[in-house]
Image (cartoon, coloured by chain):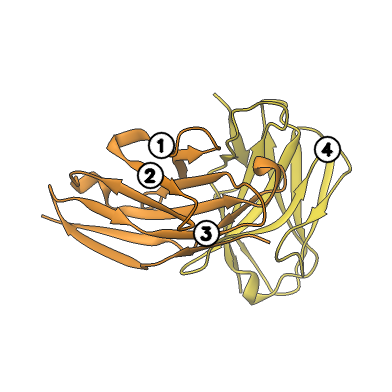
Chain colours: A orange, B yellow
Amino acid sequence: AQSVTQLDSHVSVSEGTPVLLRCNYSSSYSPSLFWYVQHPNKGLQLLLKYTSAATLVKGINGFEAEFKKSETSFHLTKPSAHMSDAAEYFCVVSRAGGGADGLTFGKGTHLIIQP
Amino acid sequence: DVKVTQSSRYLVKRTGEKVFLECVQDMDHENMFWYRQDPGLGLRLIYFSYDVKMKEKGDIPEGYSVSREKKERFSLILESASTNQTSMYLCASWEARSSYNEQFFGPGTRLTVL
């Protein structure tokens, strides 16, 4: 079985400061891991994905995540927050086979950007 | 670009009604999925389908059924809607044969059951 734990339900940072959204996963096989973002009243957008290639994954809008197998973590970072980054972020693990059986989502982290 | 469309953005139904949520994808994807999204719970998988007339239960299938008569269309059915099925429902599709490995999501249907 697989599961995802997002360690913070809300994160608040000031504009221009670094962002860290924490995610731990559990999987009985080599997982595919993803981060999705959902802006208010908008659809889900893929930020980045890890599929057993490079452990440091770069995504859109300056976000990146590092896969650490020893720590079973896949934390999302960004060096400098923008107001437009305010959104809900989901850490996601494939159920099996890279996504053929669907995805398991974390409960989400609400990112707040203070001016 | 892959496009996943859902028949309604907003839907209001009464308890006990039979409800159909429709999803269509235009990229000939084999796999399709239905999720529900609730605040503080993230998205949870209800059902998925590998191919026409094939279906598999996800994590929370109780109270739901699905139909896939054509490859591009995947329907979610609430046989007798209840208030605890008030939620946002998202459909997704995925190509099993490519290495691209991304699920493409529709815009969602916000269902309210009164």
Left or right of residue B68: residue B27: left
The disc, 3 or 2, on the residue closer to the chain's N-terminal end is 3
Mark number displayed over residue B51 = 4
On-image quarter of the C terminus of chain A: bottom left
Q: What amino acid is labelled 2 in the image?
A: Ala
Residue corresponding to mark 3: A25
Q: Callout 4: few (<14), some (14-19), or many (20+) C-alpha neighbours within 10 Å?
A: some
Left or right of residue B25: residue A25: left
Residue corresponding to mark 1: A57
Which SS class for mark 3?
strand
The disc, 2 or 1, on the residue closer to the chain's N-terminal end is 1
Q: At x 84% / y 49%, what residue is drawn?
A: B55
**Dividing the picture into quarters, in which one does residue B20 lie?**
bottom right
Residue B87 on image: x %, y %: 57, 65
Please name whichever residue, B74 or A1, is drawn nearer the observer in this view of the structure.
A1
Instruction: Using the image, name the chain to which the residue with label 1 belongs.
Output: A
**Cα–Cα gap, marks 3 and 1:** 16 Å
**Cα–Cα gap, marks 1 and 4:** 32 Å
Which SS class for mark 4?
loop
Q: What amino acid is labelled 1 in the image?
A: Val
Q: Cβ–Cβ below 8 Å for labels 2 and 1?
A: yes
**Cα–Cα gap, marks 2 and 1:** 5 Å
Instruction: Using the image, name the chain to which the residue with label 4 belongs.
Output: B
Left or right of residue B30: residue A88: left
Residue corresponding to mark 2: A65
Q: Callout 1: few (<14), some (14-19), or many (20+) C-alpha neighbours within 10 Å?
A: some
Left or right of residue A31: residue B79: right
